[in-house]
Image: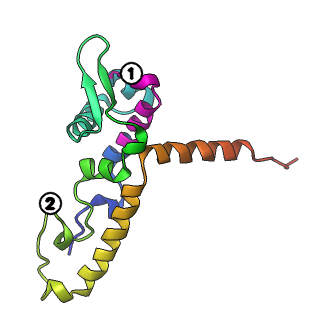
Amino acid sequence: MGLSIALIDMISKKTLYAFRALIHLAGVPSHQPVLIADLAREENIPKKFLEFILLSLRKGGLLNSRVGKGGGYSLSMPAGKITIGAIIRILEGDLAPVQCLSTTNYARCEECQDEATCGIRLTMSDVNIALSNVLESLTLADMIERSAAARIKLQNVVDFSI
């Protein structure tokens, strides 16, 4: 029985780059558009790969884009409205840990005799619900705030070494 999402193993580089790009865009004053070339350079993300990521996020409704002078990408909503779950779903697909729970890529497990009584499915259903609840309750703004709080905490550490 294979797992249907990379999140169980590890989030892909594509999603990690997306987080970095979104954090950058969230920090731009007045949500001014940022050029892909500038974003790629400042975040050290391969430009072609970033283009694909930003296009996916735009199609997913998280970004706006403008062409021409003054163009580029910007967040389509405040960072506090963009859930981590939405970002991951756009880039990684369904979050179900087993395919028999998937709403977009359902497949019955070959080994399963009865889905209604399958202990694996029932347990993974609880995992799926817990994971979805956490990912839908955390936002891009939370990610930014946690990073800022960690930086402040590190700056306030007193070094007593001599």
Q: Residue at x 38, y 35 (%)?
A: 21
In the rendering, at what x and y percent does residue 102 appear? 18, 66
Q: Which residue is mark 1?
A: 32
Residue 57: assigned label: none
Between 47 and 158, which is closer to the camera in this rendering?
Answer: 158
Between 150 and 136, which is closer to the camera in this rendering?
Answer: 136
**In this rendering, position of residue 33 left or right of residue 26:** left
Q: Which residue is mark 2?
A: 104
In the rendering, at what x and y percent does residue 24 appear? 44, 32
Mark 1: few/some/many CA within 10 Å (<14, 14-19, 20+)? some
Q: Amino acid at mark 2?
A: Thr
What's the CA distance linking mark 2 and mark 1? 35 Å
Report which quarter residue 95 is drawn in. Answer: bottom left
**In this rendering, position of residue 93 left or right of residue 31:** left
Mark 1: secondary structure: loop
Is residue 23 located in the magenta-colored stretch of the structure?
A: yes
Magenta segment range?
18-35
Is residue 32 located in the magenta-colored stretch of the structure?
A: yes
Mark 2: few/some/many CA within 10 Å (<14, 14-19, 20+)? few
